[in-house]
């Protein structure tokens, strides 16, 4: 079975070019394309929709409605900002993602995403310098829809395209410049706080130091923790009834050398972990007093989160990445069952849910604060509270990005390959064929 990489059409044996879109057929997908995918059509449709909406809102409606109340005109401007311009920005990033896919350079999206981070912060700085005027307006429009589209759509597109790259009939260079892009992104929060005029050493020295300390803990204890996970006992020793098994002999290259977006998402998982523990955990078990509903309270929260990052991130971070790279199975001789060696798999998936619950809790706390505990369910209050909670979360994430991404980068660069060979040397996993062969005898 062959499917066109560009349009997803099923290809016939003798075709040199796709009969639907004209794309080459020497490079093709070996499986039916995923339902949600990046295509030229998607980008064009979104672009036309965004542009039409923008023209209607900006030129046609104000022309027709000249004697409507001012608040209607305000609503039109807000709709343009919130919908039309973001649609255009999103369509352009989708188009870029499409080009990088058919040119077989998926790492172009990584570069675009990192530029999104940098653009956001540089324009933020320029806006503060300029103050007002036509240049201000242009930069303002560039920053909001475009930098956020580059970051969010960039991440989303890269994950979608990875699935298609995996089912291609050829090997594609899946990453390039990942260390440089990660290094730039690590610096972005520092630039952000600098542009706010912060001179706190806690930020410029503290954040990188926390990252370094986190990585050191990972470097020393990750393989030990993997053994505890694998053998399900604290001494990390193999018991009689078990056998370590590997399905494939080769370690996945993407597991050892992930691209920039995967490193970014890995570091984000760590942030979600600390966020859910702080917000949700402290709500249930208030050991220390923190206030997650204000900017002042956040500084305090972030300090506890840094400690949690150093102490607890090893549970879901590096040990999980090692498991993913090794793809180990445990063969239980007693019940003759092969199971995946990764007890924290479920915790990993629950973190998103916990973080979402924590976020809702922050919204509640903010709206409680705003209204002094009364009349909590007005629509505009909830809207305002969500906006504030989102702002607080982004500020929280910026404070965690430098240490967590730095630790992630250092681990992939200096530790994981050594850890993988160390675990393989000590566990001596056998191939699944050997086990099946033995069982047959
Ligand atoms: Zn085609």
Image (cartoon, rainbow, N blue to C red):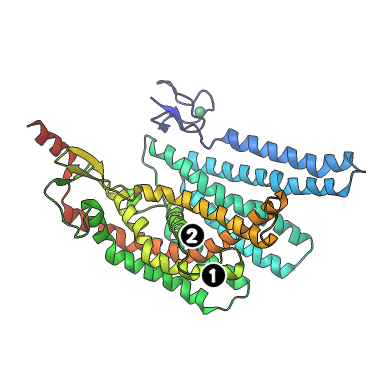
Quarter of the image where one finds residue 249? top left
**437 or 306, nearer to the observer:** 306
Q: Residue at x 40, y 64 (%)?
A: 407
x and y, in percent, of residue 392 in the image:
59, 61
Q: Residue at x 43, y 42 (%)?
A: 162
Judging from the image, what secondary structure is the residue with disc 1 in?
Answer: helix
Residue at numbered disc 2: 275
Q: Residue furthest front?
A: 374
Judging from the image, what secondary structure is the residue with disc 2 in?
Answer: helix
x and y, in percent, of residue 98 in the image:
53, 40
Q: Residues within 10 Å of mark 1 (few under 14, many from 20)?
A: many
Task: Please say if 191 is above or below 10.
Answer: below
Q: Kindly identify which numbered label has been placed on residue 284.
A: none
Judged left or right of residue 93, residue 428 is left
Judged left or right of residue 150, residue 281 is left
Quarter of the image where one finds residue 313? bottom left
Cα separation between marks 1 and 2: 20 Å
x and y, in percent, of residue 404 in the image:
44, 63
| Label pair 1/2, CB-CB below 8 angstroms | no
Residue at numbered disc 1: 190
Q: Is residue 177 visible?
A: no
Q: Residue at x 61, y 54 (%)?
A: 147
Task: Please say if 90 is above or below 390.
Answer: above
Specify the quadrant that holds the N terminus. top left
Specify the quadrant that holds the C terminus. top left
């Amino acid at each position: 079975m062959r499917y066109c990489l560009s349009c997803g059409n099923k290809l016939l044996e003798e075709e040199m070019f796709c009969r639907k879109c004209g794309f080459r057929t020497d490079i093709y997908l070996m499986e039916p394309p995923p339902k949600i995918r990046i295509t030229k059509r998607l980008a064009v449709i979104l672009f036309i929709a965004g542009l039409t909406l923008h023209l209607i809102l900006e030129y046609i409606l104000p022309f027709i409605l000249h004697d409507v109340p001012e608040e209607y005109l305000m609503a039109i401007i807000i709709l343009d900002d919130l919908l039309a311009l973001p649609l255009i920005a999103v369509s352009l990033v989708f188009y870029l993602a499409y080009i990088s896919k058919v040119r077989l350079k998926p790492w172009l999206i990584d570069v675009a995403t990192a530029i999104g981070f940098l653009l956001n912060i540089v324009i933020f700085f320029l806006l503060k310098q300029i103050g007002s005027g036509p240049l201000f307006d242009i930069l303002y429009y560039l920053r909001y829809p475009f930098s956020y589209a580059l970051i969010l759509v960039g991440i989303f597109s890269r994950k979608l395209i990875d699935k298609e790259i995996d089912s291609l009939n050829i090997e594609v260079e899946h990453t390039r410049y990942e260390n440089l892009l990660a290094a730039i992104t690590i610096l972005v929060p520092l630039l952000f706080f600098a542009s706010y005029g912060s001179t706190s050493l806690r930020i410029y020295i503290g954040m990188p130091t926390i990252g370094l300390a986190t990585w050191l803990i990972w470097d020393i204890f990750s393989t030990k923790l993997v053994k505890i996970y694998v053998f399900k006992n604290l001494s990390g020793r193999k018991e009689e009834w078990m056998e370590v098994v590997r399905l494939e002999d080769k370690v996945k290259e993407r597991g050892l050398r992930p691209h920039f977006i995967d490193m970014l998402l890995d570091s984000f998982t760590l942030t979600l972990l600390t966020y859910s523990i702080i917000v949700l955990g402290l709500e249930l078990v208030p050991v220390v007093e923190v206030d997650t509903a204000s900017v002042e309270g956040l500084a305090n929260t972030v300090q506890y989160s840094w400690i949690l990052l150093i102490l607890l991130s090893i549970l879901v971070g590096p040990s999980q990445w090692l498991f993913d790279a090794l793809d180990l199975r445990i063969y239980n001789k007693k019940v003759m069952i092969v199971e995946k060696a990764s007890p924290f798999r479920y915790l990993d998936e629950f973190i998103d849910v916990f973080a979402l619950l924590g976020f809702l809790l922050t919204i509640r706390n903010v709206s409680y604060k705003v209204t002094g505990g009364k009349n909590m369910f007005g629509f505009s209050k909830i809207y305002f509270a969500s906006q504030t909670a989102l702002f607080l979360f982004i500020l929280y994430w910026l404070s965690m990005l430098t240490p967590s991404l730095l630790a992630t980068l250092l681990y992939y660069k200096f530790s994981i390959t050594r850890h993988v060979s160390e675990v393989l040397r000590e566990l001596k996993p056998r191939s699944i064929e050997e086990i099946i062969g033995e069982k047959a005898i």
